[in-house]
Image (cartoon, rainbow, N blue to C red):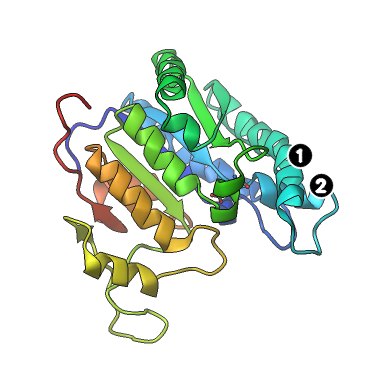
Amino acid sequence: MKKKIKKIVIKVGSSLIANYKTGSPKLNWMNSFINDLDYLLKKKIKIIIVSSGAIAIGRKKIGFLKKKLNLDEQQAAASVGQIYLVNNYKKAFNKKRVEISQVLLTLEDTIKKEKKVNAKKTLNKLLEKRIVPIINENDTVATDEIKFGDNDRLSARVAEIIKSDLLILLSDVSGLYDKDPKKSKKAKLIKEVKSINKFTIKAASFTNNHFARGGMKTKIMAAKIATNAGCGMVIVNGNTKKIIQKIFEEEEGTYFHPKKRKKNN
Ligand code: GLU
C-alpha cells in the first residue's frame, strides 16, 4: 500500500459528518479531518472527497427531525442539507487556502459511457488545478442509491474512472472482523484481504453497523469495484485521531489489495 500513491479518493460516512438524531453537524470532526489532510497535501497527493451527510444535516433544517423519512422527504432533506454540507467543507478548506468544488453524480453517471467520460474529464481538470472536488450522490434523482445509501459504491466508481491508487472508506467501524466482535472477545480485525471470497462476505455480515445506511455489504461491493480496477481500498474508523496519517505510517483498518490494472483500463 505504501507504494507511490498519487491520487486518493476518501469517502466520508454520514455518522462522521452529523449527529443523525439531532441533525447537528460535527464541525470539530470536520476541522480535524481537514487538518489531517495536510499530510497528503504536503506530499502533493491529489484528493477527491465523496461525502455523505446531506440528509443527516438537512432533516433538521427542513423540520423532519422526529420522523422516519420517505424517499421524497429524504431527497428534499438532502437538497437543503447539501448546501450546509459543502459550506462546512468550504470554511474548513479555506483555512488551508485550498479551493474546493461541488460535484453531484449518480451511480449511473459513472457507468454509462458518455456521462462517465464527462465526469472523468471534469474531475481530472479539477485535480490538475489542485482543487479538491467534494462529491455526493445527486439525491434528487438517485432513487435506487438513496435507498441503498450508497456513496460506498459511488466512491469506488469514482476511484475507477480517475484511476485512483487508493480508496479510503472513513466509517464508524474499524474494519472487518473474523468473528462477531459483539459476541466474541476473541474477534480479531482482519488486517488485509488479498481476494474477496466467501470468508470475506461472512466477515462482512459480522461487522454490520445498523446505523449506517450501506453497512458492510456496500463496502464489500465497493472493494470489488475498486480492487478490480487496480485501486487498493482500506476501511478505517474515521473517529481515530490523525487517521489519514496513521493509514500510511501504521497498520490501520482492513486493507484490500488491488488487482493488476488492465492495460486498457
Ligand atoms: N447521499 C446521502 C447524503 O448525503 C447519503 C448516502 C450514503 O450514506 O451513502 O445524505
- Disc 2 element: helix
Question: In the rendered image of this protein, does residue 153 appear above or below residue 9?
Answer: below
- Disc 1 element: helix
Question: In the rendered image of this protein, does residue 199 appear above or below residue 162?
Answer: below
For marks 1 and 2 on the same chain, the one whose residue lies earlier in the sequence: 2
What's under tag 2, amino acid-wise?
A: Lys
Where residue 216 appears, as percent x and y from the top left, is 41, 62
Give how far apart the Cα atoms at labels 1 and 2 are.
7 Å
Where residue 54 appears, as percent x and y from the top left, is 66, 44
Where residue 102 appears, as percent x and y from the top left, is 58, 26
Residue 127's quadrant in the figure? top left
Q: Mark 2: few, some, or many residues within 10 Å (few <14, many ≥20)?
A: some
* Disc 1 within 8 angstroms of ligand 1 (CB): no
What's under tag 1, amino acid-wise?
A: Val
> Which residue is nearer to you in this view: 18 or 106?
106
Q: Which mark is residue 19?
A: none
User: In this orientation, does residue 39 appear?
Assistant: no
Identify which residue is drawn at 85% across, 53% down: 63
Identify which residue is drawn at 25% across, 47% down: 249
Q: Is residue 134 left or right of residue 5?
A: right
Q: Mark 1: few, some, or many residues within 10 Å (few <14, many ≥20)?
A: some
Identify which residue is drawn at 73% across, 38% down: 79
The residue to which callout 2 is attached is: 61
Question: In the rendered image of this protein, does residue 50 appear above or below residue 56?
Answer: above
**Which of the image's four quarters has the C terminus?**
top left
Q: Is residue 70 left or right of residue 175?
A: right
**Is disc 1 in contact with disc 2, using a CB cutoff of under 8 Å?**
yes
The residue to which callout 1 is attached is: 80
Q: Is residue 218 left or right of residue 27?
A: left
**Which of the image's four quarters has the N terminus?**
top left
